[in-house]
């Protein structure tokens, strides 16, 4: 369906046209059999449109998923509580249950937007798990995708980062959710779990008042939830036009025009870039093409792992790779395979892409038959003529004391940005 929406014209009038009933219905067509869905609704135009469209879709079916709209009040603006109440009123009018969750406690003085985002996703994940939902829906648009690609280009991201946001991504209910800004996968040196451990995130925040589907038992709480972005191919202007046509009000968050934030500055660049032909549709096209390349690279890395590893990988045992086979791999495949091995056994957070590239370059420059040893991200990499071995690095010692770093839990699949 989203492919059909992309094929339409991209004139100014087309980009500001309200969504038709058929288009709106197709957005949620693959969710008909889901038992329950949580909608993330802040009260802004994008998420308000998500609520309206999802409610219309659900009301057209005799049977279908149970819906729950959830608003996270970060407590950062005086207006946020009133905006949450406005969402509650709209949800009630649409026949959708609503809950407000709050990010409580002292707020960080730096990196506020990113940490607030992680707080929001964790609270939403907990709400979805308790509700028995299989999907959490967010209202990211084509414009958000374009801004994300620009931000990652500015940071020098690799193909994974420039692939932008995926329409679907697994969201483990008991772990922090992927950030829409940082993207899925790993890299860039940002340790999301460490940030969460050091942030004063509320775990009480009205969760006891959430409705449960099927009793909210332990099994449902541990179910893997899918983060779905059904509006990712739709321009923001079309969502605003849809709301105006329906006479539905929405809130405007002043932080969305605050130039202190990188995303806002990237947003301000888009009109000038569009004048040169690099509009949101082109940036989203770049992301889709790179995501397609990512799938091919993932497949190549999986094949290399199977071909070069004599033993299954584990967190506690050294990982061995055939040295000659590793040296013969294409550079990008070898780099990703090495990064995955380091992420598997290391215990010092995510692998920074630039540092991984430096390690790989040093490996490639090692003369045949020479030995090589270096540590990165809590892993020790040793090259012998026959084997490339990646294992947990020995504990570091300083001033007569042994320093150890607790190993954070890791998702099963990792990607470089």
Image (cartoon, rainbow, N blue to C red):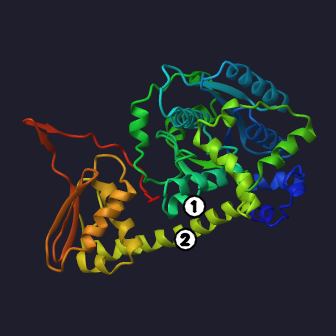
Whether pointer 1 and pointer 2 mark residues with C-beta atoms closer than 8 Å, the reply is yes
Q: Is residue 34 visible?
A: no
**Residue placed at 86% from the left, 56% from the top?**
12
**Residue placed at 15% from the left, 50% from the top?**
394
Of the pair 183 and 151, the residue shown nearer to us: 151
Compared to residue 401, the image places residue 276 above or below, namely: below
Task: Estimate the x, y position of residue 368 in percent, counting from the top left.
Answer: 18, 80
User: For the residue labelled by badge 1, is the local secondary structure a helix, a strand or a loop?
Assistant: loop
348 with respect to 29 (left or right): left
Q: Is residue 153 visible?
A: yes
The residue carrying mark 1 is 163
Task: Estimate the x, y position of residue 169 in percent, counting from the top left.
Answer: 57, 53
**Residue placed at 39% from the left, 32% from the top?**
197
User: For the residue labelled by badge 2, is the local secondary structure a helix, a strand or a loop?
Assistant: helix
Assess disc 2: are there few (<14), some (14-19) or many (≥20) residues with their C-alpha within 10 Å of its C-alpha.
some
**Residue placed at 52% from the left, 46% from the top?**
178
The residue carrying mark 2 is 293
Of the pair 109 and 4, the residue shown nearer to us: 109
Assess disc 1: are there few (<14), some (14-19) or many (≥20) residues with their C-alpha within 10 Å of its C-alpha.
many
Q: Quadrant of residue 364?
A: bottom left
Which of the two labelled residues, at mark 1 and mark 2, occupies the earlier sequence position?
1
């Amino acid at each position: 369906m989203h492919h059909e929406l992309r094929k339409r014209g991209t004139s100014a009038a087309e980009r500001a046209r309200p969504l038709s009933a058929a288009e709106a219905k197709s957005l949620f067509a693959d969710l008909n059999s889901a038992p329950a869905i949580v909608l993330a609704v802040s009260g802004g135009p994008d998420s308000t449109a998500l609520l309206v469209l999802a409610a219309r879709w659900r009301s057209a079916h005799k049977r279908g998923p149970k819906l729950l709209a959830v608003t996270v009040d970060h407590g950062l603006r005086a207006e946020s509580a009133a905006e949450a109440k406005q969402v509650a009123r709209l949800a009630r009018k649409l026949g959708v249950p609503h809950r407000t969750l709050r990010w409580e406690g002292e707020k960080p003085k730096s990196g506020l937007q990113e940490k607030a985002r992680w707080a929001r996703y964790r609270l939403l994940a907990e709400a979805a798990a308790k509700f028995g939902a299989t999907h959490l829906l967010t209202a990211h648009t084509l414009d958000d995708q374009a801004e994300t690609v620009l931000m990652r280009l500015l940071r020098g991201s690799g193909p994974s980062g420039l692939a932008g946001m995926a329409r679907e991504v697994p969201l483990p209910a008991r772990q922090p959710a992927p950030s829409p800004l940082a993207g899925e996968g790993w890299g860039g040196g940002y340790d999301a779990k460490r940030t969460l451990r050091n942030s004063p995130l509320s775990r009480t925040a009205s969760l006891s008042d959430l409705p449960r589907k099927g009793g909210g038992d332990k099994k449902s709480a541990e179910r893997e939830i899918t983060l779905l972005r059904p509006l990712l191919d739709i321009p923001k202007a079309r969502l605003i036009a849809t709301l105006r046509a329906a006479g539905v009000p929405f809130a405007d968050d002043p932080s969305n025009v605050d130039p202190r934030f990188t995303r806002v500055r990237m947003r301000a660049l888009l009109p000038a870039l569009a004048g040169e032909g690099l509009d949101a549709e082109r940036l989203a096209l770049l992301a889709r093409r790179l995501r397609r390349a990512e799938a091919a690279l993932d497949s190549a890395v999986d094949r290399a792992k199977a071909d070069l590893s004599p033993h299954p990988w584990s967190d506690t045992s050294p990982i061995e790779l055939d040295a000659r086979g590793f040296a013969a791999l294409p550079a990008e495949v070898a780099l990703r395979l090495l990064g995955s091995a380091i992420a598997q056994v290391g215990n010092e957070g995510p692998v920074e892409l630039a540092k991984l590239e430096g390690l790989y370059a040093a490996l490639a420059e090692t003369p045949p038959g020479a030995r090589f040893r270096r540590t990165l991200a809590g892993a020790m990499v040793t090259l012998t003529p026959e084997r490339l071995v990646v294992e947990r690095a020995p504990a570091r010692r300083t001033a007569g004391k042994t320093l150890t770093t607790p190993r954070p839990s890791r998702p099963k699949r990792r990607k470089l940005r």
